[in-house]
Amino acid sequence: MSTLVGESILPFYKTYYELGLNPEEMPIISPITTELEIRAMGPKYVAGHYSCFSYFQSLDIPENHLFVKGMKAKYGLDTVISSVMCNTYIGIQIVLDAICHLQSTDRKKIVKYLYQKEFSSPSGKIKIESNHHLSREVRIGKAKENGQFEIVWSSGQQISARPLLTNTLLDSMDEEEIWKVLVEEIGKEVSDGIIVVDQNNKILYMNPYAYSVTRAKQGDVLDDAHLSDIGYEVTKREVKKSYHVFLIFIKKTSVQSPSCGIPSKNKYQFGNIVTYNQAFQKELHIASIASQFDTNVLILGETGTGKEVLARTIHEQSHRRNGPFIALNAGAIPRELIASELFGYVEGAFTGSKKGGSIGKFEAANGGTLFLDEIGEMPLELQVSLLRVLEERKIVRIGDYKERPVNVRVIAATNRNLKEEIAYQGSFRSDLYYRLNVFTIHVPPLRHRIEDIPDLSMQFLHQFHQYYGKGPLELCDSALQMLQSYHWPGNIRELKNVMERAFLLAINEPKILPLHLPEDFQNFSTIKQSHLAGNLKYMEKQMIEQVLQETKNITEAAKILGVTRSTLYRKMNKWNIRKKHFKSSSS
């Protein structure tokens, strides 16, 4: 059984023939090799072998005779016709049929019209299923000396196409109606994790937050035990009995009261990394296991989530802790210099090379760990060299021929989706990807682990206090609530920068207040609170009460709110706010 494609097919069949392997005794069957490949390599090399398609040029039915005649009239008598050509023709044929019938090119109308329609085609009768694929007869052909196939077996009936999602969700003509029902049901809930499963608990769809919590993926079976273990509020609802489709809602952990400094949850610690987020705890547990072995690790996460910090922690918790930790950002080095940075070079290897040459990062990290950040930015041609080093544990300096053994543990990181890079962009090698991701660790963005913000904020404050020798060591409740309400596009790196700015603005104050945070945070918090409060006036009352609770007198409160004492007194009278809101009643 062969699935070789492209240029690999030709030398494979030729070598098979030249080795004297008899197709009558051990034939090759390929669901990919067509009449076009036979012409390219020569019929004698393929004769006796088999292929499997719904269409062969030799198919003896009137529709195909007409199709072949038309193709040869258009493109020449020596034209060879393949299944790919036929499929393209069928696709255009059925779309044109719909347009002519409907007198419209509206996509939705065309899709609805084509549901369950049957057509005659060069490959026989075809039917369009509700999942937009074709069901049709399937055949096995035996290659002949003339470059054509003799059809030796046929299914005799149409076979339904079941690619990718083979579930009840799409096996209905009312697909659009189903999705409308799903959207309506989702709209009734206020939840952060959304999962759709069939009657066998097979996952049909899940949003990113649900994935970060459960670590399950589309196609997995999500049992009740798994849901009960994640520690979140989970509800399950059947959308409609006849569809056997269920919605699962996973509620985000509510924002904890910051008055005690940290949320009241069990924490998990790996090295110096501490988290109260259950999804991140699972990832850190994987990291702790990975640290005990020399296997490669791939860390995935958005920019600023602390991928290098995690890589260093894995190194520090491993038996290589006494060896070097060398980091290289593949996205920050010019393409032409990455190879010399990784592998080193000998004197005279290129113009401008240093006298005596230089070792590369692999040799510098010998006995320790090499961290390759932004691995998705590495040029495709260099990925081959990296794969060779990972497999053979030897490097060759640029301009040299001598192999040098290296004992290095590689940890790579990226904010890209490497599977998509492989599948759609072709910019990352699949063999390198699978070599790197023996252990894959996902670092969740800060907006998905807001329960960690109080602890992270306090860590940063203590670091700054130690560095500057003075400054606040506390956050007031309202400032912390602003931090937990923010969406953090820059993640932990952004949090650290914000905290340092606030620390310096409050360097002579006992604690950080909302006015010390950037204006963006205050605006974001105001907008968010206004949605919750319902109107600006009510939000104003809440803001005044909140500031009064954080201050000791009218003068201090008025300063924070940016109003005069008389204005504040007037607003307190308007909202019937009494001095009981103060920490102490002196004003």
Image (cartoon, rainbow, N blue to C red):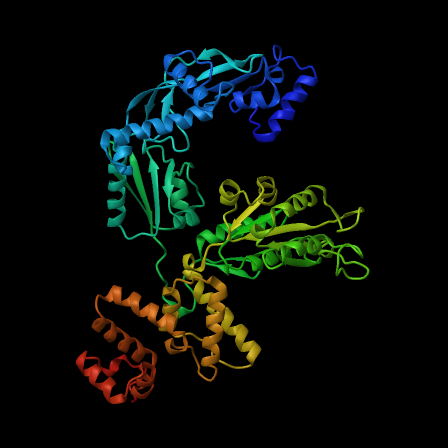
For residue 384, side relative to residue 202 (left or right): right
Seen from the viewer's position, the closer of residues 237 and 425 is 425
Q: Give coordinates of residue 79: x percent, y percent.
A: 50, 21
In the rendered image of this protein, does residue 565 appear above or below residue 328?
below
Q: Quadrant of the N terminus?
A: top right
Q: How many numbered discs, if any?
A: 0
For residue 262, side relative to residue 540 (left or right): right
For residue 67, side relative to residue 25 (left or right): left
Q: Quadrant of residue 18?
A: top right
In the rendered image of this protein, does residue 102 appear above or below residue 444?
above
Residue 103 in view (yes/no)? yes
Q: Give coordinates of residue 556: x percent, y percent.
A: 34, 86
The residue that appears at 41% across and 39% down in the rendered structure is 218
Q: Give coordinates of residue 345: x percent, y percent.
A: 76, 54
The residue that appears at 81% across and 47% down in the rendered structure is 402
For residue 374, side relative to residue 492 (left or right): right
The residue that appears at 39% across and 38% down in the rendered structure is 223
In the rendered image of this protein, does residue 65 appear above or below residue 587?
above
Residue 1 in view (yes/no)? no
Seen from the viewer's position, the closer of residues 181 and 8 is 8
In the rendered image of this protein, does residue 398 appear above or below residue 20?
below
Seen from the viewer's position, the closer of residues 297 and 76 is 76
Q: Quadrant of the C terminus?
A: bottom left
Q: Give coordinates of residue 266: x percent, y percent.
A: 45, 57
